[in-house]
Image (cartoon, grey):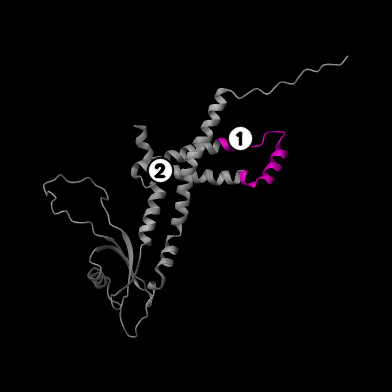
Amino acid sequence: MENKKTNPKKKQGKSLTKRITGWLHLWLGLVSGIIVLTVTLSGTVFVFCDEIIDLCGGNAKYVTAPAHSKKMTPEELLVQFHQQVPDRKAFYFDTYKEADRSFRVASATKPPKDNNADKAEKPKKKGRGPRGVFAYHYLNPYTGKVIGSTKSYEFFYVVAHIHAQLLAGKFGKTVVGVASIIFFVQLIGGLILWWPKNGTKQQEQLHLKLNPEQNGAGKTTIFIMSLDSIHYFRPYLLPLQD
């Protein structure tokens, strides 16, 4: 007669709660991860804005300095700029000590005038309002002549607003803040799942060596980044408590 051994307990299927938790963990992590990734990539590009702007300026950044000549004053150069580019309005400039560096002006196209606007209208709410297209113009500081221009200012203006608000204003800031909180909670759950249990440390260490992209160092780095995002967007999350 054969000895019948008791069958080991069969693995029971996942409960409804675990299935719902897993579904939420997957999709909340996916959506919040895409938002955090967008914010991170745009911030990474923005960090190098000065270098990229100089690269876009090309040869217009430099001029041949004539002997025994003085540079024009910034006020004189701005007058020359508005005479040559009358459809734009300067709002700041960069001047350099080097004799061969050009004078850089940041400007925006002027919004069209509304001749039919009623002067008796109520004052508008505070805000940026309509704006033109931003650009940099380079002027010869000795002659006042415009020698080049680039739209790099406009590009980084868009990148900065993608990073801060996903181009969606105050609502976008709130979305980024909420996504950062969700991503932060997901990271805590991932760290708890990753943390090796007693008796399985060697297996976990071997798994981490074979899969370095899943180790805790990467999770910790993103953990700190998500904390920074939550702190930055905290003022835009406070109104949600009201």
Return the residue at label 1: 193
Regarding mark 1 in the picture, which secondary structure is present there? helix
The x, y position of residue 180, in whole percent, is 46, 41
* Furthest residue toward bottom: 67
Q: Which mark is residue 82?
A: none
Three-letter code, disc 1: Leu
Three-letter code, disc 2: Phe
Relative to 93, does residue 197 appear above or below in the rendering?
A: above
Q: Give the range drawn in magenta.
A: 189-214
* Residue 235 showing in the rendered view: no
Relative to 154, does residue 63 appear above or below in the rendering?
A: below
Query: What residue lies at 39% left-to-right and 57% top-to-bottom?
Result: 156
Badge 1 crowding class, 10 Å Cα cut-off, few under 14, some 14 to 19, many 20 or more, is: few
Task: Please name whichever residue, 122 or 226, is drawn nearer the observer in this view of the structure.
Answer: 122
Query: What residue lies at 27% left-to-right and 72% top-to-bottom?
Result: 77
First reached walking from the N terminus: tag 2 or tag 1: 1
Question: Image quadrant of residue 125?
Answer: top left
Instruction: Please name the predominant secondary structure of the magenta segment in the image.
Output: helix
Q: Which mark is residue 233?
A: 2
Closer mark to the observer between disc 2 and disc 1: 1
**Total numbered labels:** 2
Regarding mark 2 in the picture, which secondary structure is present there? loop
* Furthest residue toward front: 1
